[in-house]
């Protein structure tokens, strides 16, 4: 017992009440499944392939699948990332300006998510450009919201 | 020493200690000021807005950082600390205080404490996921506590009593704002809560209302006469809700989170936190909105950035030198002229504001608020 400081005392206390990952998930009333979301994903893809990126970003940042499982979220995110890639750098500012503050909060979640996974890191430059334009327009508010929000994309 | 500031909303600023002040409280007649300073609670006598408060007593029974202090309407002081204890300090006629230990029975730090309006009981929040409602037991000559445990999932950050002394609002790091009943038999009467819009029966510890916010809840305050609760959270929002769970939410203008709030009247609230200055919000026909900043430093950098963003859409990064240039300028000034910078004006608080309280009221309207900060200052603002 030389390293007694490392003993996890909470493990011996059934009433320690340590938070689990499950405790941190917000209380969702309904859960979105991949099947529910499929129409939205195809709509998103068709909008972005037809070049209507403005509507595509608008759709992507409206009512994201917070309650879905990780696979569904990943599927949705791939469609969003493809849309983000489509946008020409010169158009980003105007698109971000056309979104409301709730959509800014969602958009920044996608940017952070992208930067945290290999698929997104390959597009790091694009994501950082989006991030730059977004923070120029909306300030630090979306960042602060992202850091403290347990609804993840 | 008191500080000269150019903003006229700052009535007085006192640099009292070199450590953070996590909590402060004025006595009912505003003649005494209690602040937390590391493991001590310091008591000052006020000498008006221009003279420095005079240290009259040091309460030093705690052996870990004191997290909160409150003074009852009878002048009893309660302190709670990370050492898991709370003390009630009874003022004696010679100006000293007699401490009584409170049996909190918690195994984590106590984080916040607040007296009930009648001054006969108080509630302590803790990291042990427990709210301890404490009251004096004559036969044992002790302050004993009853626990509210369920369904709290994490540390309690803030507590607020309704004016009826029964309903207790709490907020914490599990992202919930909850209203519990703190009804103590023998102290409270059922008449106090008769006809309450929040329910019909209030046995001790029952969950009266619950709302999920998500982010850490830093402060919560009742507005009893209109049955509303306001709270601020770590996502930088001020939120107001009522018994119908009709919620209104408004963002901080700077984006930085608030640590504290105080109701000014039924339609105005002052918040303050990490942006180091108070912000006034007001309720208009379209709902709650940002009204004005108090003692906000007009930062030249900010002005440049905002003009920059409203400008043309595509810009090269090299053409955006605001941040780097100001740092360069600062060091040049320091190097060539030996001064920090001529145009730097500081707000009264130089660090985050930890707590707000009403300082002066007239006809139901708060006219002055006091604040304590991590910079060791107490500031009084006029609204």
Image: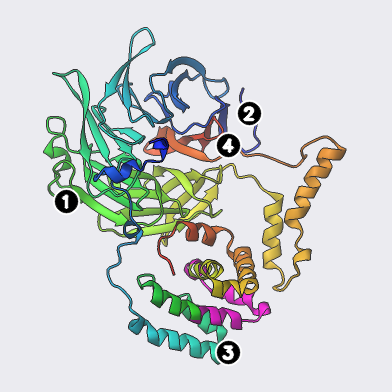
Start-end of magenta stretch: A79-105
How would you classify the magenta stretch by its main secondary structure?
Answer: helix
1 vs 3, front mark: 3
Are both tags, 4 and 2, on one chain? yes
- The foreground one among B310 and B329 is B329
Q: Is residue B383 visible?
A: no
Graded by Cα atoms within 10 Å as few (under 14), some (14 to 19) or many (20 or more), the crowding at tag 1 reads: few
- Asked if disc 1 and disc 2 are in contact, CB closer than 8 Å, the reply is no
Question: Looking at the image, which residue is at 78% across and 64% down?
Answer: B318
Are both tags, 3 and 2, on one chain? no
Helix, strand or loop under label 1: loop
Q: What chain letter is assigned to the residue under label 3?
A: A
4 vs 3, front mark: 3
4 vs 2, front mark: 4
Q: What chain letter is assigned to the residue under label 4?
A: B
Does residue B363 appear left or right of residue B343 in this picture?
left
- Gap in Å between the C-alphas at discs 1 and 3? 55 Å
Question: Looking at the image, which residue is at 53% across and 60% down?
Answer: A143
Query: What residue would you read off at disc 3?
Result: A51
- The foreground one among A127 and B4 is A127
> Is B265 drawn above or below residue B16 in the view shown?
below
Does residue B38 appear left or right of residue B119 in this picture?
right
Query: What residue would you read off at disc 4?
Result: B349
> Is B139 drawn above or below residue A38 in the view shown?
above
Question: Looking at the image, which residue is at 23% across and 43% down?
Answer: B149
Query: What residue would you read off at disc 2?
Result: B3
In the rendering, at what x and y percent does residue B271 appear? 47, 45
**Extreme bottom residue here?**
A50
In the rendering, at what x and y percent does residue B379 appear? 53, 32
């Amino acid at each position: 017992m030389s390293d007694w400081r490392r003993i996890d005392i909470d493990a011996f206390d059934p009433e320690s009440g340590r938070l689990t990952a499950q405790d941190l998930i917000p209380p969702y009333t309904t859960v979105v499944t991949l099947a529910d979301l499929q129409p939205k994903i195809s709509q998103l893809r068709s909008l972005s392939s037809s070049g209507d990126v403005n509507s595509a970003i608008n759709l992507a940042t409206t009512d994201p699948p917070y309650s879905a499982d990780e696979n569904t979220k990943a599927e949705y995110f791939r469609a969003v990332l493809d849309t983000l890639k489509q946008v020409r750098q010169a158009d980003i500012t105007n698109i971000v300006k056309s979104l409301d503050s709730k959509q800014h909060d969602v958009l920044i979640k996608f940017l952070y998510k992208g930067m945290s996974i290999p698929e997104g890191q390959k597009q790091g430059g694009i994501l950082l450009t989006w991030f730059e334009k977004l923070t120029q327009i909306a300030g630090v508010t979306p960042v602060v919201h992202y850091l403290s929000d347990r609804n993840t994309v | 020493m008191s500080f000269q500031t150019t903003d006229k909303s700052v009535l007085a600023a006192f640099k009292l200690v070199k450590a953070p002040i996590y909590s402060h409280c004025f006595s009912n007649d505003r003649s005494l000021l209690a602040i937390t300073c590391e493991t001590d609670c310091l008591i000052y006598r006020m000498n008006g807005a221009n003279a420095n408060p005079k240290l009259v007593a040091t309460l030093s029974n705690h052996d870990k950082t004191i997290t909160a202090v409150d003074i009852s309407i009878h002048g009893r002081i309660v302190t709670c600390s990370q050492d898991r204890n709370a003390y009630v300090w009874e003022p004696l006629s010679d100006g000293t205080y007699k401490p009584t230990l409170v049996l909190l029975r918690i195994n984590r730090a106590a984080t916040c404490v607040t007296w009930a309006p009648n001054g006969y009981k108080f509630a302590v929040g803790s990291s042990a996921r427990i709210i301890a409602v404490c009251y004096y037991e004559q036969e044992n000559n002790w302050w004993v506590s009853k626990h509210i445990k369920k369904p709290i999932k994490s540390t309690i950050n803030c507590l607020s009593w309704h004016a009826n002394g029964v309903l207790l609002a709490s907020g914490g790091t599990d992202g919930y704002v909850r209203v519990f009943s703190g009804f103590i038999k023998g102290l409270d009467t059922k008449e106090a809560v008769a006809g309450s819009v929040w329910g019909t029966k209030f046995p001790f510890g029952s969950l009266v209302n619950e709302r999920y916010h998500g982010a850490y809840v830093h402060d919560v305050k009742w507005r009893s006469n209109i049955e509303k609760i306001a709270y601020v959270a770590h996502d930088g929002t001020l939120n107001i809700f009522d018994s119908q769970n009709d919620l209104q939410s408004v963002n901080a203008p700077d984006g930085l989170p608030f640590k504290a709030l105080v109701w000014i009247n039924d339609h105005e609230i002052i918040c303050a936190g990490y942006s180091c200055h108070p912000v006034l919000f007001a309720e208009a026909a379209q709902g709650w909105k940002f009204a004005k900043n108090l003692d906000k430093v007009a930062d030249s950098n900010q002005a440049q950035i905002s003009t920059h963003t409203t400008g043309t859409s595509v810009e090269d990064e090299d053409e955006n030198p605001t941040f780097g240039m100001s740092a360069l300028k600062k060091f040049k000034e320091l190097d060539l002229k030996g001064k920090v910078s001529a145009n730097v004006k500081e707000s009264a608080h130089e660090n985050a504001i930890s707590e707000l309280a009403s300082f002066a009221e007239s006809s139901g309207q708060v006219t002055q608020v006091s604040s304590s900060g991590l910079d060791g200052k107490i500031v009084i603002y006029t609204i």
